[in-house]
């Protein structure tokens, strides 16, 4: 894990009604804030990821160029670095950590940007997967202050099928008796293995497996890939953290907040910032049709399908041509 | 469970090299064998299913018309009725039940047809899912005796992605410590729940969940559907039986036998019987592209996509228009 900063917001009332004392965001920044404070890019993190997963899209000459922009990467609540089940004290520790929503994430991030740097205007908010969900929230909650938005392989509102697939992941993890209702003495290793292996089929496409693209990642056989890339995928994580993130993901809905009171058309319609929404053609979580239905309700958005066989990972910086495709779209939004 | 017959084949050497004593096929028949013995339809069963799942495609006036045809439904080995981990005696009981392949299934079925009824000619072999896999095997192993074949939502050769998704199901089931390496005292209920809920996302399409088609099945909410249709889906089954079937499924390859020695082109090319292969447009296990690649190598086959949002269930008799689509194709093959 590379170095990161933390910002302690003090007690924060969450959407659930519970107060999180010492609500903390872990973050990193790339580049320098200019005097006008108008070169800010916000790039939140994905499920089971941290700021360390973001670099493929950041670099000199790329859209997210630290020589031009001040790029802020806030870690999502529950990811183990920002406030999470694993780092909060009893009685809000472990399985008793309160439910967190993306509304909570984004309101906290917005406060951090104001209080730490006096930032009011966001040049671009973008992200992959759960990071894309937060980007949607930013654009709907602060339509006058977000200048551009992009979500790659993510959604504004979690679709019922995604909810169901996540139910499977949750149950695969908690079927391990060592989980003990979240009061485990050590991590439920067997449950992690089950979750990892069950997740493997969802993350990459049928075609990706047919073409044995794991070879491009340096694995010697399909079993070698499952064993080394997935069986232990969650071992460095905390089970309650993973469940907290899944709960946030399942609850994702840009209208489920005091601004929109469940009016999804109003929330999507409020996103006036130029937006490019990029589903992966073969993403099994977020099929292009779901994003198409969202884009149809957004006044200034474009659907741009990543024609990739890398499934959900099309947006994740694993495959250079996909990364270049995303980078080109972000460049347009910043032009 | 409706009444069924059993046929005891005595000791049978399986492809694995192990001998199954008292190898038994459970079966039902519909209709009457004619004097020429040329009105035979073979219709094997699916994963976690029995002969009781077949009726939607059988009936007077349908393609599988018991007034015209002698329809034989053999239960797949491992399904709990034919020889299975749960009904075989030690030392081949439970987790020590030998690996069974579809080659084993079909060779045993072929012997049963000859020994019980003197049947040499099969007018049609057809099936859904694992039943479709067996249909492919029949047509490749007995090309001179099978007059027509149809596989709906199934494959000749298990694709790597399907292998991976089944790995997830296996691990969700066995993550439950009550599984005890297969030597359980009672069924691993929590593992069954995990497998059921993890399976729910694979069986039906994203669109099916988006449109809340569970309402058509009589459920009151998504959670009601998951709870009543999936959480307990495997409770009447046996865990080792389910794992035996998964192993058979994962090993499915019509060329993995002494006739073809792994030559997939030769095995597919040998299927000269007119065949209609019907993938579901939204089937997440068996996408149309996989069947298309198979059909391209078969001399007399047609790909006919079921344009349904019922995912894998398009072939399973749950939705009347899909059933009518499959029935019409079978009618053509029998014309």
Image (cartoon, coloured by chain):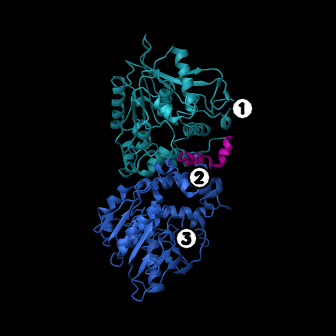
Chain colours: A blue, B cyan
Measured from the top left, where is residue B331 in percent x and y?
34, 26
Which quadrant would the C terminus of chain B be assigned to in this image?
A: top left
Parent chain of label 1 = B
Q: Judge the density around disc 2: few (<14), some (14-19), many (≥20) Cα neighbours within 10 Å.
A: many
Name above or below for residue B95 compared with residue B208.
Answer: above
Q: Judge the density around disc 1: few (<14), some (14-19), many (≥20) Cα neighbours within 10 Å.
A: few
The reply to whether callout 3 and callout 2 are in contact (CB within 8 Å) is no
Which one is closest to the eye, mark 1 or mark 2? 2
Which segment is the magenta one? B164-184
Left or right of B161? Residue B184 is: right
Is disc 2 placed on a helix, strand or loop?
helix
- The answer to whether tags 1 and 2 share a subunit is no
Parent chain of label 3 = A
Is disc 3 placed on a helix, strand or loop?
helix
**Dominant SS type (magenta):** helix
Can residue A318 be seen?
yes
Left or right of B292? Residue A197 is: right
**Which residue bears the numbered disc 2?**
A226
The reply to whether callout 3 and callout 1 are in contact (CB within 8 Å) is no
Say if the magenta span includes residue B180.
yes
- The answer to whether tags 3 and 1 share a subunit is no
Q: Which of B45 and A149 lies nearest the eye of the viewer?
A: A149
Q: Residue furthest left?
A: A299
Question: Image point 33% across, 33% down: which residue?
Answer: B324
Question: Image point 39% across, 83% down: which residue?
Answer: A38
The reply to whether callout 1 and callout 2 are in contact (CB within 8 Å) is no
Q: Which residue lies furthest to the right in this view?
A: B91
Q: Which mark is residue B91?
A: 1
Parent chain of label 2 = A
**Which residue bears the numbered disc 3?**
A52
Which one is closest to the eye, mark 3 or mark 1? 3
């Amino acid at each position: 894990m590379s170095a990161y900063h933390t910002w302690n917001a003090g007690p924060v009332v969450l959407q659930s009604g519970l107060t999180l004392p010492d609500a903390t965001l872990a973050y990193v920044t790339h580049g320098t804030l200019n005097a006008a404070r108008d070169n800010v890019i916000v790039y939140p993190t994905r499920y089971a990821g941290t700021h360390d997963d973001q670099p493929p899209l950041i670099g000199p000459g790329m859209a997210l160029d630290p020589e031009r922009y001040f790029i802020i990467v806030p870690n999502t609540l529950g990811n183990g670095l920002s406030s999470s089940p694993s780092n909060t004290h009893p009685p809000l520790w472990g399985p008793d950590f309160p439910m967190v929503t993306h509304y909570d994430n984004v309101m906290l991030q917005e406060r951090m940007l104001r209080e730490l740097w006096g930032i009011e205007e966001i040049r671009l908010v973008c992200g992959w997967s759960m990071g894309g969900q937060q980007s949607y929230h930013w654009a709907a909650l602060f339509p006058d202050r977000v200048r551009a938005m992009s979500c790659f392989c993510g959604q504004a509102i979690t679709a019922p099928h995604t909810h169901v697939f996540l139910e499977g992941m949750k149950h695969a993890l908690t079927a391990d008796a060592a989980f003990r209702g979240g009061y485990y003495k050590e991590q439920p290793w067997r449950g992690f293995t089950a979750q990892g292996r069950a997740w493997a089929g969802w993350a990459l496409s049928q075609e990706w497996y047919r073409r044995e693209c794991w070879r491009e990642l340096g694995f010697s056989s399909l079993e070698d890939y499952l064993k080394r890339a997935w069986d232990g995928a969650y071992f460095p994580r905390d089970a309650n953290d993973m469940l907290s993130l899944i709960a946030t993901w399942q609850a994702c809905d840009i209208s489920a907040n005091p601004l929109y009171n469940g009016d999804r058309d109003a929330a999507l319609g409020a996103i006036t910032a130029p937006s490019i929404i990029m589903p992966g053609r073969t993403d099994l979580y977020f099929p292009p049709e779901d994003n198409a239905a969202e884009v149809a309700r957004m006044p200034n958005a474009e659907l741009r399908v990543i024609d990739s066989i890398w499934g959900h990972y099309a947006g994740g910086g694993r495959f250079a041509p996909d990364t270049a495709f995303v980078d080109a779209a972000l460049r347009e939004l910043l032009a």
